[in-house]
């Protein structure tokens, strides 16, 4: 036993029992009619859209040429291959969908109020909003109007399944290649970041051993670069004669020259030409004063100089005759005793 369901109605007045029975029979036939007509097609039902249910209008009841219309929006899934429309309506016609006549009962059995249905494919854009409007007239029965429904058929896979695709990128912009799966996803997964990426690292050192801190980049290098050599400390040092900044040696004697520096790359001593950031050498025999200049190149690029002075004592001599440093008078053909002494002299 079928269960009666009241479809949307508006303002119907039952003027006689016969009319009520007539309307009830029409509704039962309508409910019995299949909503979706099966179609022989290999694709799969993936969705549907109701544009309008059965519409009634008491004002137009029994009027030949009465017009009924409705509109709606359908959203076919992106993998829709075919959109199929089903119309279930009162005896009458024609039916216009989106302004074009798509179905007509010829000849219409006016006043018999037999439920009719039709189905056909309709063009719709997958994955987008599609407006659909329908209009029917010449339907004078109590349940004027139509039910309009669209079924969407498609493959279990999206239309571009199997095509090449690219995964999302990792932090370094690297991707993997794959193919589009049935559900539209890409088979390729995002590649892992390179080993060590983002870890802490230390730059190479500048000339004085200073470094900077950074992180490992996509190519495996460190983001930090070595500090400039100009950041190195200023050069410093000294040069000494016999352990002092200046010394005095005897005439023809020699002194010991030593030097030491810090934060330098090269040094030389003038006028001798000695070299090295540290060193020690003998002056050799000196008979005149001498100044030794230490000149260095600093690690930070700046020069450095230091000096040491060696003073040579002047030679002196004392001579005496018969013990007198002055003039003496002696007899003719007598002996004279001469004595002398010297200081700071190499030879006399």
Image (cartoon, grey):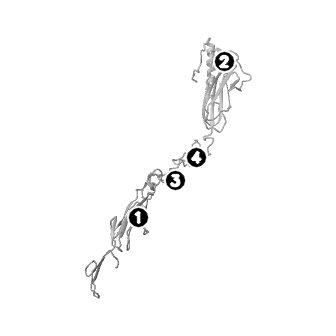
The tag on residue 203 is: none
Q: Nearer the viewer, mark 2 or mark 1?
A: 1
**Disc 3 secondary structure class:** loop
43 lies above or below 322:
above
Circle 3 residue: 219
Question: Where residue 7 sits in the image (x, y, percent)?
Answer: 59, 21
Circle 1 residue: 294
The mark nearer the N terminus, 2 or 4, is: 2
The mark nearer the N terminus, 2 or 3, is: 2
The mark nearer the N terminus, 3 or 1, is: 3
Which picture quadrant has residue 19?
top right
For disc 3, the neighbor class at 10 Å (few under 14, some 14 to 19, many from 20) is: few
Question: Where residue 50 sits in the image (x, y, percent)?
Answer: 61, 28
**Disc 4 secondary structure class:** strand
Circle 4 residue: 166
- One can see residue 19 in this view: yes
CA separation in Å, label 2 and label 3: 79 Å
Which picture quadrant has residue 209?
bottom left
Task: Tell me if label 4 and label 3 are in contact, CB under 8 Å.
Answer: no
- One can see residue 205 in this view: no
Q: Nearer the viewer, mark 3 or mark 1?
A: 1
149 lies above or below 297:
above
The mark nearer the N terminus, 4 or 1, is: 4
CA separation in Å, label 3 and label 1: 47 Å
For disc 2, the neighbor class at 10 Å (few under 14, some 14 to 19, many from 20) is: many
Circle 2 residue: 141
Please tell me which residue lies in front, 314 or 308.
314
Task: Tell me if label 3 and label 1 are in contact, CB under 8 Å.
Answer: no
CA separation in Å, label 4 and label 1: 67 Å
**Disc 1 secondary structure class:** strand
Q: Nearer the viewer, mark 2 or mark 4?
A: 4
Please tell me which residue lies in front, 108 or 195.
195
């Amino acid at each position: 036993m079928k269960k009666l369901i009241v479809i949307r109605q508006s303002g119907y007045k039952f003027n006689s029992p016969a009319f009520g029975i007539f309307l009830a029979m029409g509704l039962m036939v309508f409910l019995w009619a299949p909503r979706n007509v099966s179609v022989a097609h290999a694709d799969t039902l993936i969705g549907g859209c109701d544009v309008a249910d059965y519409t009634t209008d008491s004002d137009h009841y029994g009027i030949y040429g009465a017009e009924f219309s409705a509109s709606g929006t359908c959203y076919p899934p992106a993998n829709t291959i075919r959109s199929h429309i089903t119309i279930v309506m009162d005896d009458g016609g024609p039916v216009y969908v989106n302004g074009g006549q798509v179905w007509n009962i010829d000849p219409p059995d006016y006043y018999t109020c037999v439920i009719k249905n039709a189905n056909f494919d309709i063009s719709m854009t997958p994955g987008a909003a599609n407006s659909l409007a329908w209009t029917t007239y010449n339907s004078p029965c109590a349940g004027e109007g139509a039910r309009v429904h669209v079924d969407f058929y498609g493959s279990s896979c999206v239309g571009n399944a199997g095509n090449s695709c690219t995964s999302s990128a990792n932090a370094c912009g690297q991707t993997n290649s794959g193919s589009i799966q049935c559900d539209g996803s890409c088979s390729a997964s995002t590649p892992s970041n390179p080993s060590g990426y983002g870890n802490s690292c230390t730059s190479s050192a500048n000339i004085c051993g200073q470094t900077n801190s950074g992180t490992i980049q996509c190519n495996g290098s460190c983001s930090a670069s070595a500090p400039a050599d100009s950041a190195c400390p200023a050069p410093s040092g000294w040069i000494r004669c016999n352990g002092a900044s200046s010394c005095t040696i005897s005439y023809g004697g020699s002194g010991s020259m030593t030097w030491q520096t810090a934060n330098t790359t090269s040094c030389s001593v003038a006028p001798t030409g000695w070299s090295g950031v540290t060193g020690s050498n003998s002056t050799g025999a000196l008979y005149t004063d001498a100044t030794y200049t230490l000149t260095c190149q600093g690690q930070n690029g700046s020069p450095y100089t230091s000096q040491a002075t060696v003073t040579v004592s002047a030679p002196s001599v004392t001579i005496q005759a018969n013990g007198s440093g002055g003039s003496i008078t002696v007899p003719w053909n007598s002996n004279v005793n001469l004595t002398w002494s010297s200081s700071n002299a190499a030879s006399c």
